[in-house]
Image: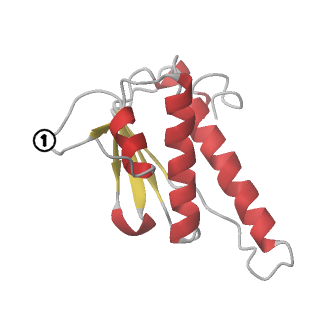
Amino acid sequence: MHESWLGYPFGVADLNLDSLTIVPHCPDTHYDAYAEVANLSQTHTLAHILAETLAKPRYGLKQVKRILVLNDNSFSEDLFQLVYRSTVYRLWKRGDSGMRFYEYEGGKGFEVVLEGLDGRRLRTIDEEIKRLIKTPD
């Protein structure tokens, strides 16, 4: 997103957002002979785009404190969990440790909180990696 928008959300340099909601839409491919390949390719691409957008430096997202990514039900629960897991892993691998994570149940979406907490128990990137790969503390 930051590459196609010249480093700014939607290409607007003075956009001042506290929260950004992204609702990616998965094209309908379940009738296609290559549906599985297309779906996996789309989840890989989305995870890459999200990780790059959230990565340090956050380019034009400097004011954004929270990013909410919602599933519009065009992704299956399993595919959307793959997007989430891949995004978290990519950020962890890059060393972006200041973020907090909250995954909604049932593949409905997830939040990445970049600044501030609102009383919910949000997980650090290390805690989330441990939870995702189910390692003991």
Q: How many marks?
A: 1
Q: Nearer the viewer, residue 78 or 70?
A: 78
Residue 117 horizontal/vertical position (percent): 20, 34
Res 53 quadrant in image: top right
Residue 102 at x, y = what percent? Answer: 32, 48
Position of 6 compared to 29: left or right? left
Percent of width and height locating residue 75? 58, 67
| SS for dot 1 | loop
- In this rendering, the answer to whether 6 lies above or below 124 is above
Q: Quadrant of the N terminus?
A: top right
Which one is in front, 108 or 123?
123
The amino acid on which the numbered mark 1 sits, given as a three-letter code, is Gly
Q: Residue furthest top?
A: 57
Q: Is residue 54 visible?
A: no
Q: Picture quarter containing residue 5?
A: top right
**Among all residues in the image, which is located at the extreme left?**
119
Q: Nearer the viewer, residue 11 or 90?
A: 90
Quarter location, residue 100: top left
Q: Residue at left 13%, top 41%?
A: 119
Q: Nearer the viewer, residue 9 or 29?
A: 29
Residue at image point 57% right, 35% down: 90
Identify whether 104 is placed above or below 66: below
Residue at (40%, 24%) from the top-left corner?
Answer: 97
Say if residue 64 shows up in the picture: yes
Which quadrant would the C terminus be assigned to in this image?
Answer: top left
Q: Bin the neighbour count of mark 1 within 10 Å (Cα to Cα): few under 14, some 14-19, many 20 and up.
A: few
Query: Where does the image place residue 4, in percent across and percent down from the top left?
Result: 71, 32
Identify the residue position indicated by label 1 in the image: 119
Q: Residue at x 39, y 34 (%)?
A: 125
Colour scheme shown: secondary structure
Residue most extreme to the bottom: 31
Would residue 70 appear left or right of 100 to someone viewing this image?
A: right
